Image (cartoon, grey):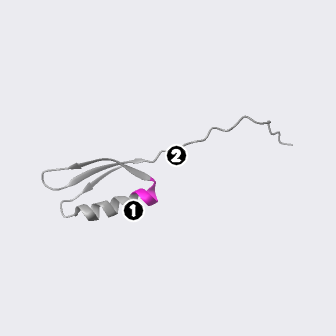
Amino acid sequence: MVLRLPPEVTRINAAMRLAIQAEFGGWELKRTRLYPDGSRKVLLRRKRTRTVPREAGPAVESA
């Protein structure tokens, strides 16, 4: 996901917006770029969830 923040958005306000997006949307910050005009381009990526391999056990048969 790419977000473009205008120059009027302060750094603190941008951090709050990104924290909310990350917490409720399952995103994490990948990269931030500040342009000469003051705007910011932010790249977010989906959080990776670790999968735990299942232990081999007895097979379950359905009746």
Crowding around mark 1 (Cα neighbors within 10 Å: few <14, some 14 to 19, many 20+) is: few
- Residue 52 circle label: none
Q: Is residue 25 magenta?
A: yes
Q: Is residue 16 left or right of residue 54?
A: left
Q: Where is residue 27 in the image (x, y as percent from the top left)?
A: 42, 52
Which residue corresponds to mark 1? Answer: 20
**Distance of mark 2 from mark 1, alpha carbons?**
19 Å
**Which residue is found at the position 13% from the left and 54% from the top?**
37
- Residue type for callout 1: Ile
Q: Is residue 30 above or below residue 10?
A: above
The residue beneath circle 2 is 49
- Residue extending furthest toward the right: 63
In the rendering, at what x and y percent does residue 22 appear?
41, 56
Q: Residue at x 39, y 59 (%)?
A: 21
Left or right of residue 11, residue 57 in this image: right
In reply to whether residue 5 is colored magenta, the answer given is no
Q: Which residue is drawn at 28% across and 65% down?
A: 13
What kind of secondary structure does the magenta stretch mostly adopt? helix
Magenta region: which residues? 22-26
Q: Which of 55 and 42 is in front in this view?
A: 55
Residue 23 figure quarter? bottom left
Identify the mark nearer the N-term, 2 or 1. Answer: 1
Counting from the top left corner in percent of width and height, residue 10 is at: 22, 63
User: Relative to residue 1, is residue 62 drawn left or right?
Assistant: right
The amino acid beneath tag 2 is Thr
